[in-house]
Image: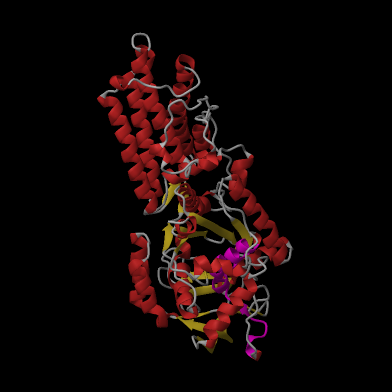
Amino acid sequence: MSAAATASKKRKVLVTAALPYSNNRPHVGHLGGAYIPADIYVRYLRLAGADVRFVCGSDDHGVAIMITAEKEGKTPAEVANYYRAKQAEDFAGMGISFDIYSGTSVCPLHAAQSQRFFRHIHDKGYFEKQSSRQFYDEARAAFLPDRYVKGECGFCGTPDQNGDQCENCGKMLDVDSLKNARSVLSGEPAVVKDTVHWFLDLSRFGTEVERWLETAKVREQTKAYVSGLLSTGLVKRAMTRDLSWGIPVPLQDPDATGKVLYVWFDAPIGYISFSQELCQRAGQSASAADAWWRSDDAEVYHFIGEDNTVFHCIIWIAMLAAEGSTRLPNGVIVNHFFNMQLPGGAVEKISKSRGTAVWIGDYLEAGGDPDTLRYYLTSIASEKSRSVFKPDDLEHRHNGELADTLGNLVNRITSFTIKHCGPNVPEIDADKITDLDRALEAGLRSTFDDVTRELEGHSFKAALERVMQFARECNKYVDEKAPWSSRKTDMEATKVTLNYVLHAIHGLGVMLLPFIPGAASKIVGAFGRDLPSVQWLDAVEARLVGAPLSQPPILFQKLGAQPTQK
């Protein structure tokens, strides 16, 4: 087979992480909910040889940014640009390896792409122009879309909910189901007035959503939740808004004057426009992104938090089905919310105003180790239910699992080998190999198979648990073989022990590269490996006999203080 033919068979995967509103910096809940899981998957795919693109950027339009701009006395563009830069800085500090981090207000292709989507759906007759009832602030003479209005959920009674969706029950809200509504602008009660908008009737695409849900890779609770929404019937959803900050509605219609696209219409299109921008940055045409977005040879996965489920698993699927030329995603990987429990306190929702948040920028500025936070958030991942971030538990796991179980193993074995066998992985006498040695090698291979399967299934918590289980097995092996004693009587048997455990340590390093890339790269580097050349299969297939060996620096210093909270 020719090189070109081989390359054409390479797995192509495009991964996106939810676009954060550009009105704040990320906290640990954001990171654990979408960005670390997506990054773990991307890093694994790259090691496995896939052709991967990791796409993200800020969601700059809509009410959230306008509210922040009003509070800070800035323009929406100034707010978006400031926070986008801070977000990119925080993500980079945590080792999130985006190929592009753009923004819906600065991507040179996004407005045109969003308007093309809108016109295409409009020309196919899927939009319905109609007068609708909308909340209105009489004191400010302004309509109140979405997050400009708060009230009580009419389904579950939860107070202080935004005007588009209840955070508690997940139901979509409108002027009839949001009770005791008040304006965020003035604090006054909101009244209801008529305005004209363009609606997408989601019920027309219920069958497409059902079919997609049958084959898509989604977690079971996501499938159950979306199926429940489908069973109660989908509704019409306005895809335009009465706002000054956003992408203008691209219609020659007097009623379109002063209206912009609904932020949840243009935001997911950012995945496509950012992909096109990435291609342009690489010297290609924007249409090169079609290799991912219009080809059955590629896979597309979205990583999001639970509050974005409706938008990605129903509205986005309906939009794509209506537009018709763009592929549906292969999967939407949803994680639940993280709560916070400070020492001695109760479990609470992560909240800036209540002081129950660990902000990524603060954590990094205080000297927090990115690998420690990545490890901890993955170890408590909210894949099946909501999880609780506990600063004291982070310290406990860092000291007991990262420093003791992993770091101590790596440092004591590399230093012992260099001291007693020299600066290379020792050669061995095959006659000295025991069943205990063979069992360790078999354990490495079974761990590799298990971890690969869990990663492919987007079960990152289970994958990490399996790696650390093997690290404990390695420590047990070393304790049982006791090379510090055997070297006094049988150096050849000691070399076997060291050879096998060094192969296991190298395998641990490769398997941990997606999870804790900083420390794992030091482990792999201790064997003289050039990181870009490392492949996933090297975890079990690398031939290390005679390889140069060095002792890495201490991987994890013991923690004695908790990360900074603000």
Q: Is residue 186 above or below residue 484?
A: below
Q: In which quarter of the image is residue 224?
A: bottom left
Q: In which quarter of the image is residue 184?
A: bottom right
The residue positioned 58% from the left and 70% from the top of the image is 287
The residue positioned 41% from the left and 80% from the top of the image is 205
Q: Position of residue 129 (x, y in %)?
A: 54, 89
Q: Position of residue 25 (x, y in %)?
A: 61, 53
Give the magenta part as a residue range.
255-280
Is there any visible trace of residue 144 in the rendered image? no
Q: Does the magenta stretch include residue 262?
A: yes
Residue farthest along the top direction in this orientation:
489
Judging depth in this view, the residue of 472 and 221 nearest the camera is 472
Numbered label tally: 0
Residue farthest along the front direction in this orientation:
2
Q: Is residue 448 rendered to the left or right of residue 416? A: left
Q: In this view, does 103 lie above or below 261?
A: above
Judging depth in this view, the residue of 277 and 67 nearest the camera is 277
Q: Is the magenta stretch mostly helix, strand or loop?
A: helix
Q: Is residue 526 rendered to the left or right of residue 456? A: right
Q: Does the magenta stretch include residue 334?
A: no
Q: Where is residue 438 in the image (x, y as percent from the top left)?
A: 29, 29
> How was this image coloured?
secondary structure
Q: Where is residue 122 in the image (x, y as percent from the top left)?
A: 54, 85
Q: In which quarter of the image is the N terminus?
A: bottom left
